[in-house]
């Protein structure tokens, strides 16, 4: 068992080999790393960030022919022991196995714990423990391959180019394939419902759509100001060419499937980032006022809003990231607020 040190691009052994067959990556979350800013809401950000990270890990593993298999149902206590997480300051979020064999997640000795801030967010701890289970579930479906992938840079180049766009050009529009192909790629194997608020896509009338139907809008007209208000006056919500909204009925979720829904939304958001940067666009995840989302989408009040993703014409070119172990310095770009 190793911990990956991203800064040094190195593996640090923390325990002996686990039982099982398939090499398995365990993604954990440290609630303080999001909670310092978002408080208890940061628990959801852990799963969004994990999904975004897994979109890139899965793509890289698949491109290398390693057959990645994502699991979100696993015996929490066992995996905590495996990686040395205490379930309060750090806990496992997802597994990514390389190949179809049984994941190597059986601990054979205690793991060396990490050095983490001793700060607990009690509601995050309670939410995590409420969803704990003691079984290993099946891998998520991978979805059918898309036969019509457009020309783009290599995956490595796209990942290094990918960022969170802070400013978009409201006057610019994106071609229809930048919406349709990106959404088809992002939702492969994912059943969580998604809506699209279209502001500036060639050949698609402005309005609100329930994916995958782009022929019959749920609402027509310019929704920029309404989406801007729902997204707490963050300008990207109005400047983007389109805004993707992940949401699902809360009544259909238990404590574990609520985790899964958040992870799936993050996975889709991460894939939308990759697709956008592959096609020359920009993207950014977006926070929102939960209570306003049902009204925006015309859905019942028990709708659980998951995540927004803004995709549009970039106002600036991001500096590509460095290769593993060789990070680059980037210049911060401040987002705009309001219209």
Image (tube, rainbow, N blue to C red):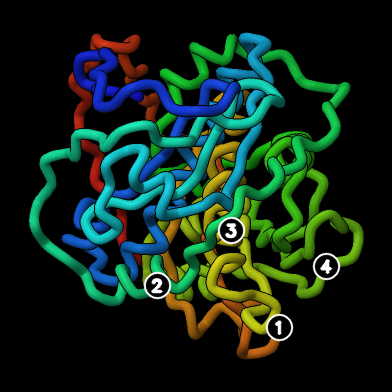
Q: Which mark is residue 260?
A: 3
Quadrant of residue 339 within the rendered picture: bottom left
Q: Which residue is mark 1?
A: 298
Q: Depth check: 242 or 325 in front?
A: 325
Q: Which residue is mark 4?
A: 217
The numbered mark, 3 or 2, whose residue comes first in the sequence reads 2
Residue 166 in view of the camera: no
61 horizontally vs 319: left or right: right
Disc 1 secondary structure class: loop
Q: Residue furthest front?
A: 108
Q: Is residue 198 above or below residue 59?
A: below
Q: CA distance from mark 3 to mark 2?
A: 13 Å
Residue contact between numbered discs 1 and 4, judged by CB atoms under 8 Å: no
Q: CA distance from mark 1 to mark 4?
A: 12 Å
The numbered mark, 4 or 3, whose residue comes first in the sequence reads 4
Q: Is residue 78 above or below residue 205?
A: above
Q: Which residue is mark 2?
A: 127
> Where is residue 104 drawn, in percent x and y?
52, 29
Q: CA distance from mark 4 to mark 3?
A: 28 Å
The numbered mark, 1 or 4, whose residue comes first in the sequence reads 4
Disc 2 secondary structure class: helix
Q: Is residue 230 above or below residue 37?
A: below
Q: Residue furthest bottom?
A: 301
Q: Residue at x 59, y 22 (%)?
A: 21
Disc 3 secondary structure class: helix
Q: CA distance from mark 2 to mark 4?
A: 36 Å
Assess disc 3: are there few (<14), some (14-19) or many (≥20) residues with their C-alpha within 10 Å of its C-alpha. Answer: many
Q: Residue furthest right?
A: 215
Q: Depth check: 190 or 114 in front?
A: 114
């Amino acid at each position: 068992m190793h911990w990956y040190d991203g800064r040094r691009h190195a593996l640090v052994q923390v325990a002996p080999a686990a039982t099982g067959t398939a090499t398995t990556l365990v993604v954990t979350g440290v609630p303080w790393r999001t909670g310092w800013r978002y408080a208890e809401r940061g628990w959801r950000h852990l799963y969004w960030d994990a999904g975004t990270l897994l979109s890139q890990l899965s793509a890289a593993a698949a491109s290398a022919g390693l057959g990645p298999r994502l699991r979100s149902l696993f015996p929490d206590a066992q995996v905590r022991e495996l990686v040395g997480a205490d379930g309060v300051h750090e806990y496992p979020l997802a597994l990514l196995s390389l190949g179809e064999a049984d994941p190597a997640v059986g601990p054979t000795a205690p793991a060396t714990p990490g050095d983490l801030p001793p700060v607990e967010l009690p509601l995050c701890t309670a939410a995590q423990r409420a969803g704990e289970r003691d079984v290993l579930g099946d891998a998520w479906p991978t979805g059918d391959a898309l036969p019509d992938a457009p020309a783009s840079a290599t995956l490595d180049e796209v990942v290094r180019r990918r960022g969170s766009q802070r400013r978009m050009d409201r006057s610019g529009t994106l071609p229809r394939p930048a919406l349709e192909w990106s959404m088809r790629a992002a939702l492969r194997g994912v059943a969580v419902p998604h809506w699209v608020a279209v502001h500036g896509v060639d050949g698609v009338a402005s309005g609100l759509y329930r994916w995958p139907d782009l022929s019959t809008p749920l609402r027509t007209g310019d929704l920029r100001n309404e989406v801007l208000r729902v997204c707490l006056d963050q300008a990207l919500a109005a400047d983007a060419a389109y805004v993707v909204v992940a949401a699902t009925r809360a009544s259909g979720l238990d404590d574990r499937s609520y985790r899964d829904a958040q992870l799936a939304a993050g996975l889709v958001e991460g894939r939308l980032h990759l697709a956008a940067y592959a096609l020359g666009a920009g993207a950014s995840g977006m926070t929102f006022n939960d209570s306003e989302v049902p009204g925006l989408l015309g859905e019942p009040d028990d709708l659980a809003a998951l995540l927004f993703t803004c995709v549009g014409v970039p106002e600036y070119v991001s500096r590509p990231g460095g290769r593993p172990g060789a990070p680059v310095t980037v210049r911060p770009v401040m987002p705009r607020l309001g219209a």
